[in-house]
Image (cartoon, grey):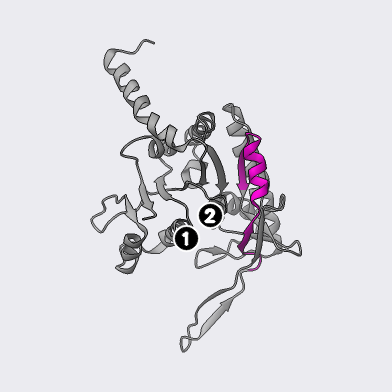
Amino acid sequence: MTLDSAQALNVAHVLTEALPYIRRYQGKTLVIKYGGNAMTDEKLKRGFARDVVLMKLVGINPVIVHGGGPQIDSLLERIGKESRFVDGMRITDTETMDVVEMVLGGAVNKDIVNLINAQGGRAIGLSGKDGPLIIAHKMTHTRRGKLLDEPEIIDLGHVGEVTRINTDVLDCLIQGDFIPVIAPIGTDEQGVSYNINADLVACKVAEAMKAEKLILLTNIKGLLNKQGELMTGLSADEVRALIADGTISGGMLPKIDSALDAVKAGVNRAHIIDGRIEHAVLLELFTDDGIGTLIERR
């Protein structure tokens, strides 16, 4: 099929608009948290894989950290085990941890690797236990009790927090021209495994790798003001003010906290973008307007 003149001009405009951004990010590391609808819709999955391969081909170093909550829920349901959550965090006993490792470190991770490789990339899948990449410790979670407002300590089982990221593992893969795909599972010094929030892992990987950007794929447009309008070009201080006045609340807070932590630690920019849009990552990176919320370190 031959393009007409209007279509050809549009293609040329897209390519020329992308060029300065490609130059800017060549040789830079970008950490992408991959989850939500982008992981379950077949068309979006293929589009994401192509985006990642294109980024690598133009000299950018993408590092992927993925979730997999719905897939874990599905397998637990099949084996007759109830999924239980406290404040949005999965209670992870030993049996559930086995399922988490099977799903995240096995099926989901290898599916993403295969998708990227099928598009001409060179992806390597690993969990935080490989290397070891992610050193973790058990999370201590407290919340207000129902009586007399006394603090209540909740045992979440094998739910962890990141102690340290072993960047040698990722540096070796990037230097070998591979695309790392990381399952958010860590281990402590005694070899105990932990289930870790993927947003948190992506944040810590971005910090440790001194990444240019942290990109969080979500199932919403980005940060919205009280009129429902998309906000972008925000400073960390402006985001904190939006949290304080209640504009940002609920389920978005953990993602925002991860983005703010990354920016505070030296990551230049954090993006919260709508993973339901095909080629969302490329549109945010390589166009003047972008499609999501940009949080800058200034």
Residue 144 percent coordinates (x, y):
48, 80
Q: Is residue 289 left or right of residue 106?
A: left
Residue 199 percent coordinates (x, y):
51, 55
Vertical comparison of 278 with 210: above or below: above
- Mark 2 highlights which residue? 207
Q: Over which residues does the magenta segment extend?
A: 157-182
- Magenta region includes residue 179: yes
Q: Is residue 134 left or right of residue 199?
A: right
Q: Which residue lies furthest to the top in this view?
A: 2
Quarter assignment of residue 280: top left
Mark identifier at residue 261: 1
Quarter assignment of residue 116: top right
- Magenta region includes residue 237: no
Indicate which disc, 2 or 1, sits on the residue closer to the N terminus: 2
Q: Mark 2 Cα within 10 Å, few/some/many (few <14, many 20+)?
A: many
Mark identifier at residue 228: none
Q: Do the residues labelled 2 and 1 touch (CB within 8 Å)?
A: yes
